[in-house]
Amino acid sequence: MVLSYTMPAFVIERDLSRCISCQVCVRQCANDVHVYDIEDDCVHSQDAQCVGCHRCVTLCPTHALSVQRNPLAFRAHANWSDQALRNIYRQAESGGMLLTGMGCDQPYRIYWDHMLLNASQVTNPSIDPMREPMELTTYLGAKPERVAFSDGRVETEVAPQLRLDVPIMFSAMSYGSISFNACESLARASREAGTFYNTGEGGLHPALYQYGANTIAQVASGRFGVHLEYLNAVAALEIKIGQGAKPGIGGHLPGEKVTPDISATRMIPVGTDALSPAPHHDIYSIEDLRQLIYALKEATGYAKPVSVKVAAVHNIAPIASGIVRAGADIVAIDGLRGGTGAAPTQVRNNVGIPIELALAAVDQRLRDEGIRHRASLVVAGSIRSSADVIKAIALGADAVYVATSALVAMGCHLCQNCYTGKCNWGIATQDPYLTKRLNSDLGAQRLTNLLRAWSLEIKEMMGGMGLNAIESLRGHRDHLRGVGLNQVELDTLGIRAAGQ
Amino acid sequence: MSWSDLENRYGDDRVSSACGLFGFIDTTGERHDGQAAISALTSMKERGNGLGAGYAVYGCYPQLAEAYALHVMCRTEDDRNEMARYLAGAFEIVHQEPLPVHSSAGVVDAPLIWRFFCVPRQADDGDKDADEYVVRAVMTANTRMEGAYVYSSGKNLGMFKGVGHPEEIAEYFRVADYAGYLWTAHNRFPTNTPGWWGGAHPFGLLDWSVVHNGEISSYGTNRRYLETKGYHCTMRTDTEVMAYAADLLMRRHGLTPKQAALVMASPLWNEIEVLPEEEQRTCQTIRQTYGPLLMNGPFTVIIARSGELIGLGDRIRLRPLTAAIAGPMLYVSSEIAAVHLIERQVEAVWTPFGGEPVIGRLGEVPECPRAVPKRVARIIEEPTYG
């Protein structure tokens, strides 16, 4: 074996005075980091394989383990970061594209963290959500421009809507990229919390049809698992054009993950790679998108909203305008920091724009064109907390999609190795030994808890602003102030600087 | 900032105030002079701080009832000339004059205030288009001109407002000399900025007038929605947003005042969801469509137009509103004491529910929406003060 120039990313420290050689760590680590030495009755660790997922640390009954970032000190160089060097060593060895999982990990400005919320003082009373009604109910879908009456009766028909109890949905993650138990957890939590999850491009497993009323089914470029029954089993449809983590490129589920169950759900042979092309092969321009939107509406009797999901790219505002004019009921925009099960590292880290700026630009453009009511705006691409949700809505979003936060709620520790299929938390894997670690009862409970906790926080902050309905916050940028932003950023976000 | 400023000098992104409101309509159309409104408003002294008061009176220009009465505040004579030139281009000016004022009143730093009685030059296609034409002309004038501001533009409608206490403003503009069948009045306690002339209430557009007590917490959402409908919120006051919302809903989209109340102070979703089917569909369609015009936060407002007066409070009733009936008279007020002061024979007094509009119309005998217990319906023989 040729010597590898890559050094371990992590160092594992085992406190031998605590270790009882129970071998929990050995059994828990799918990366084979921990090895039991039967002769010495002790456990050794092979640092090089560690991805830093903390499964062993979390489960060690005597807290004997800790995992540290390898302090290996390259000579300091502002241009040549450790990461840049490691990447080159790896590519020089493999000759391949670097792969990664989860959203962009580079230190681009996170605009959520540069916006502050308002609160009432003296001149209007803040509202206590424990005593007063506080409404988070959100309807997604095209709204009429006006209500027409005839003899006092409403004549206007509202297009099909999705009713959300909380303005937070679970973003697209396919069965294949995540385990069945993870999908089932999302589905159950959606039903429990009165919201929706999204199938991604993984089709719908027969056991999940019962959650159809809380399901958004995706139609993506590979058309995996798309058939009439699938389209009619769910509450809404989503055409996936792009994903924030990898705008402009397709997807690839390796054959080893295509188990008999996944093969049946996706309608492809067992063990074959599931390749989603970069573009839809029937969409080469906006009018083609219009045809697909209406093909789906025709297929489902105009009874469901159709969403179009795009990645936030440079000219996102006119793109979104085109999508609305093409007939989409919902435009979902996924930002630079959006997650993924697998993406080329350089694409993930360098393509697209932050969702905050994209959202602000799109909302304003649709208003300028007088078509904001014709579609709801759902944003994704790193919503980490209830504060991010409330800021997104104040910038103009109707609702948000969360995926990474949902995975973290189920146990994910963001090791960014989803693409290896060795997820020790039983989420991003199809290995039955690993998937059974995620119990869907507990997963659903944790997700429901998360949405409940965020709802409470949103209500508290809304009450503080003197608002008791979420629609009164939507697009209310006066309730945001920027800190540490330059004028161009402030203008793009459409907000004032703190103190103004 | 000078009090005489017409516009929002600090560029505050919104301006709000706490206030005293009063209004009445004589549903027989009989005209009353300004004394009742002045006394009632002045009695609610605690609700203002001398930084703004104003009156709107409907039916006060019977001789020029067919012309739009544009009331304009101007900083200088040059500004007035510029406005006059602009208006002369857009309208045939039937008559123009400075508002008669009583300069001995304790009012200082007043701008020039003129009224122009105008007929649109291109308005032969009926009233609706004439209204649109006037709205566009007013929006253009107000966004284009720094030193002049059209603050009232209705037919047979006068507005008199400025920085001062209610009695000072009344004396300054000789409000007692005007007569009308519908009066609204406002005593201001601005909270976020000093008072300024342009920011005093009432606020008007066409024959809408709005006086308002409260702070619209949903201001930005409301404003941005109205901007997509062609309204320019140059004053950044809650009152302006209310007036434009009233115009959009009730004039342009043809909603009734009750339907408009369902927009501005919508029932809760869980109230809507238990309504009978037809009503539920109405409320749901209205809220889904006009959600961005839900006025959130504490407010009471009196919205008036020719022949109609609407009182409305926010849906969780964070600001006071009392209604009273005496024969053909319908009163709305921040405090019932103000009504008792000027009306001995009050037949019904009630506090409307949050979001429940009080509506008075010319030619319709006002009715209390629910049975009033005897002990609440007071008949005051001898006023104890006044």
Image: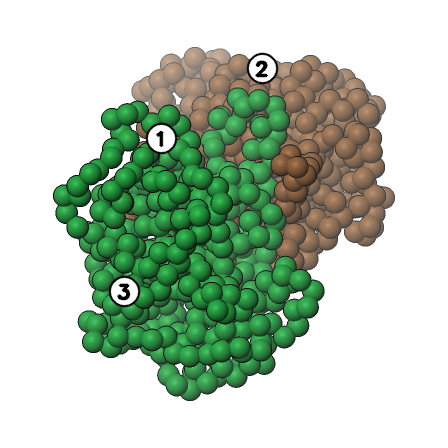
Query: Quick one: SS at disc 2?
Result: loop
* Left or right of A220 on screen, residue A91: left
The disc label shown at residue A226, or none: none
Q: CA distance from mark 1 to mark 2?
A: 43 Å
* Left or right of A339 on screen, residue A36: left
Q: Position of residue B247 (x, y in %)?
A: 53, 54
Q: CA distance from mark 3 to mark 2?
A: 80 Å
Give the position of the C terminus of chain A as an image quadrant: bottom left
Host chain of mark 1? A
Host chain of mark 2? A
Residue name at image x 35 percent, y 78 percent? B112
Q: Which residue is mark 3?
A: B170
Instruction: Please tell me whether residue A76 is drawn above or below residue B121 in the rendered image.
Output: above
Answer yes or no: is residue B345 visible: yes
What is the display colour for chain A?
Answer: brown
What is the display colour for chain B?
Answer: green
Query: Quick one: SS at disc 3?
Result: helix
Q: Earlier in the sequence, mark 1 or mark 2?
A: 1
Q: Which residue is mark 2?
A: A436
Q: CA distance from mark 3 to mark 1?
A: 40 Å
Q: Residue furthest right?
A: A282
Q: Position of residue B24 (x, y in %)?
A: 36, 49
Answer yes or no: is residue A46 visible: no
At label 2, the amino acid type is Lys
The disc label shown at residue A132, or none: 1
At label 3, the amino acid type is Ala
Q: Nearer the viewer, mark 1 or mark 2?
A: 1
Give the position of the N terminus of chain A as an image quadrant: top right
Residue name at image x 36 percent, y 22 percent? A64
At label 1, the amino acid type is Glu
Q: How is the image coloured?
A: by chain
